Image (cartoon, rainbow, N blue to C red):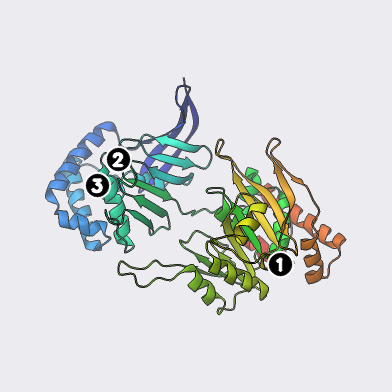
Amino acid sequence: METILDKYTIEADKIIVEVQITKDENDAVAKYLINISNISDTTKIILEKIRQEFITKVDVDDIELSERGEPESIKLKFQKEIKRLIQKYFPSTNEETANMLINYIIEENLGLGRIEILLADKYLEEIVINNHLEPLWVYHRKHGWLETNIRIYSESRIRHYATMIGRNVGKEITNLNPLMDAHLTTGDRINATLSPISSKGNTLTIRKFESDPWTIVKFIKLGTITPESAALIWSAVQNELSVLITGGTGSGKTSMLNAIGNFFPPNQRIISIEDTRELVLPNTLHWVPMETRLPNPEGKGEVSMLDLLVNSLRMRPDRIIVGEIRRRKEAEVLLEAMHTGHSVYSTLHANNAEEVVTRLTNPPIEIPKAMISSLSLIVVQNRNRRTGTRRTMQIAEITPTGDSKVLLQWDAQKDLIRQVANSVTMFERLKLYTGLTEKEIASDLQQKIDILKWMVKKNIEDVHDIGIHMSRYYRGKLTMS
């Protein structure tokens, strides 16, 4: 028996697509099914005939030029030719419908085809092609991994997609270079592999850029973090203490990094450094985003994360955000920046607070344990791969000896975050930097909890709306009504 778990519509280039997520008791996983609702089956048959006629009339070189993104006149030529064919087969069609049908045919022949529809679904985080024999898979925000009813019908087509994406950003994927990391102009991250490196066939993995980014309010509403935990992080950020966000792959590290960016005051200069732009901070902030650049095919023109990190220190930053720490030099410069009074925020692959210290003090990063004491807070994210839920698993402080001390711990069985220890180091720093007593710090934390709960109640969850309210808070003008 098939059960409908979810149902909604999306629009891609004026093509209305119905999405159904279903689960059959005989299926191992739920299905993500799409159906183009504003084009009938009969119309699709005629459009296929138009498509075939269009292909016979268009020069192959023109198609290659259009897929490289050049020139725009070629695409205009395509639109004119398809429009002529539409008028031939659908003479009474109005202009709006004709444009929609033109978009449909172009989508089927050029660009990324049906993948364009998936890119328009705001609930999808990941789109995966494993080979031409299997359907595409997607990772859905609410339902986790789902099998789709979309297939790519040849390995050459998958390779064509990878080649086309690479061309647009000056990269190439070949038998000699069968691995490629790239990104679309929209910011979506792409990884491609060619057979026989991936033994079942060519692969394409698309991690979507978050146009509607995660915010701290969305995390609280979803149960990823509690208002109490978020208030503790807010207090650290407000008072310029450095924070490291850790967790496994797909646990939400970058999303949490984006969320704590909601707490930055608007009168400070923020420099962010990423391999591929993923952060979306409130537009109230004084923010300069920067991206690394890989070398060209001749091995020239590389701009590394270390290059940007060193350069950022000459840009008078108040806050520095680094997408991810991977190597020793990056960690050394980052920790040196903390020692010289800069507030630093970054991510690291580590599954718990104790592992953070182990990773930082052992190869390949291998920095002296004493240097870690300049870091104030560790936020550990966790993803349950069985259910797809993400939670803030631990919040820990770093002691003067460079060890971690867990303050808040997620109880997986009861799905709640418990306080397991009182802060000593972080509160001592807050008292030192702010002059507040412990009682006043506790009162300030409670005020932050109340504000966060109020924003949840009022559905203030857009990143820029939160930025406006945070700006009012820092100016002493926030009123909760």
Calculate the distance from the C-alpha at mark 2 to the C-alpha at mark 3. 12 Å
**Is 45 in front, or is 124?**
124
Q: Is residue 242 left or right of residue 148?
A: right
Looking at the image, which residue sits at the far top? 1
The amino acid pointed to by label 3 is Asn
**Is 364 in front, or is 106?**
364
Q: Is residue 401 left or right of residue 221?
A: right
Helix, strand or loop for disc 1: helix
Helix, strand or loop for disc 3: helix
Earlier along the polypeptide chain: callout 2 or callout 3? 3
Q: Quadrant of residue 173?
A: bottom left
Residue shown at 68% from the left, 63% from the top: 237
The amino acid pointed to by label 1 is Tyr
Earlier along the polypeptide chain: callout 3 or callout 1? 3
Where is residue 89 drawn, in percent x and y? 17, 40
Rate crowding at label 2 as few (under 14), some (14 to 19) or many (20 or more) other CA atoms within 10 Å.
some
Residue shown at 61% from the left, 66% from the top: 367
Rate crowding at label 1 as few (under 14), some (14 to 19) or many (20 or more) other CA atoms within 10 Å.
some
What residue did someone put label 1 on? 474
Q: Which one is closest to the eye, mark 2 or mark 3?
A: 2
Calculate the distance from the C-alpha at mark 3 to the C-alpha at mark 1. 52 Å
**Is 353 in front, or is 391?**
353
The answer to whether mark 2 and mark 1 are in CB contact below 8 A is: no
What residue did someone put label 2 on? 152
Where is residue 242 drawn, in percent x and y? 67, 65
**Is 39 in front, or is 378?**
378
What residue did someone put label 3 on? 109
Where is residue 57 drawn, in percent x and y? 12, 50
Depicted 5 relative to depicted 308: above or below? above
The amino acid pointed to by label 2 is Ile
Say whether residue 105 is visible: no
